[in-house]
Image (spheres, rainbow, N blue to C red):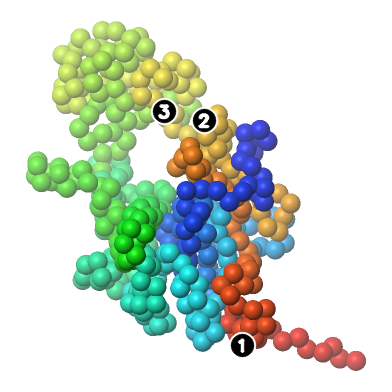
Amino acid sequence: MPAPRADQAAQPLGQTPVIGALSDLRVIDLTHFLAGPYCTQMLADQGADVIKVEPPGGDVTRTFGPFLPDDDLQAFAGYFGSVNRNKRSITLDMKSEAGREALLRLIDGADVVVENYRAGVMERHGLSYETLTARNPRLVYAAVRGFGDKRGGESPYGDWPAYDVVAQAFGGIMAITGPEGGEATKIGPGVGDIIPAMFAAFGVLAAVLHARRTGQGQFVDISMVDSILAICERVIHQHSFAGVVPKPQGNQHPFLAPFGTFPTLDGLCTITAYDDRMFGLLCDLLELTDVPQDVRFSTWQTRYENRVALIDVISAVTRLKTKAELMTLLGGKVPFGPVYDVSEIVQDPHFIARQMIVPVDQPGTDKQVLLAGIPVKLTETPGAVRRAAPVLGQHTNEILTEAGFSPDRIETMRQSGAFGPVVRKTKERA
């Protein structure tokens, strides 16, 4: 897959100044897997100083391959690198007294803590919200859990573990996804994690704004299943207003037509032209000039009632053309989009121009890898991909020095196991 040209790429890592609207925000990141790291990366992309605190073995996703073939270091593969860029890493053993002391010192000087452990884990380590906010009253503490935290509302499933597919199932999105008449289908990306991550980032910033006005922090409670339900809002009003239980409807809209996918010579495309003006223009462009006068297709209501026949009429034309030909014919005139795979995405001029395909250095190799860029574009305080995800514990000394620990104290902590097991060197035999 080709990398963007040099004149199209983001600034080289290490040469980009610390910028962004959140450059005065310090976040202690106690997250792992996908939901928590994605949330804190959103903050880091906009300039926040995100300190990723990892156990001695590191976030388990560091080991989720594949690694690049020539990566001798194998500090992390794509999964970890994709959601932990722009962060600094410190290793601390929260089971050790010195490790907890260091973590508490970091939190005392922070604006935000984000964690996505199961309920009760932080309490067992003596790091509950109540303990931390007693030390730092302005602290914003965000937790992403499968079914939320009791502080935001008690759930009968509050202690249950959850992953992406569980949230998709519980929250209702699987029940309306899949081929018409077929079984419920999981959405490809991990939306059960990523959507809660986005809500968490929004909640954190709302709470930080309040804390800076009042000096009072608060608990930000994000439930994965609640977040998925929130983006499935239409099923609630469909059930409440019309008494229906929506089912999978394939790639078409539940009450508008044409609105969905259509075949092409080399794949699929999407077309939306449900109102009279757009529909008339679409028919002109596809040389279907008599179709708008057909009583079956003359109003938006009748177009939906006869959507199967309408889809067949439009498909008979689109399947004879390539995606590129249809883009030239329809693009910019009616809502149109080719169904891209990633090999097409990385070459499309839109994503290159918008810096949505970003080259990033990969530790352990002399190569760069491509990551998805930053979709939130701020004109005065732009975010940036400033550096790759960190090697485990890469910034431990740096962060502890900033927190006021002396070099001697840091070394004593190291020898006590605060950063993980101490490896003792043995003398070679004569």
Q: CA distance from mark 1 to mark 2?
A: 53 Å
Q: From what the image shows, is residue 186 above or below residue 64?
A: above
Q: Quadrant of residue 180?
A: top left
Q: From what the image shows, is residue 43 above or below residue 378?
A: below
Tag 1 residue: 416
Residue closest to the eye, 399 or 53: 399
The answer to whether residue 369 is seen in the rendering is: no
Structural crowding at the residue carrying mark 1, measured as other residues with C-alpha within 10 Å and reported as few (<14), some (14–19) or many (≥20): some
Q: What residue occupies the far bottom of the structure in this picture?
A: 430
Tag 3 residue: 337
Which amino acid, by three-letter code, is at mark 1?
A: Ser
Which amino acid, by three-letter code, is at mark 2?
A: His
Badge 1 vs badge 3, beta-carbon distance below 8 Å: no
In the figure, is residue 82 to the left or right of 300? right
Q: What residue occupies the far front of the structure in this picture?
A: 214
Which residue is pictured at 53% across the width and 78% down the height?
102
Q: Which quadrant: the N terminus?
A: top right
Residue 350: numbered disc: 2
Residue closest to the eye, 291 or 214: 214
Which amino acid, by three-letter code, is at mark 3?
A: Gly
In the figure, is residue 46 to the left or right of 215? right
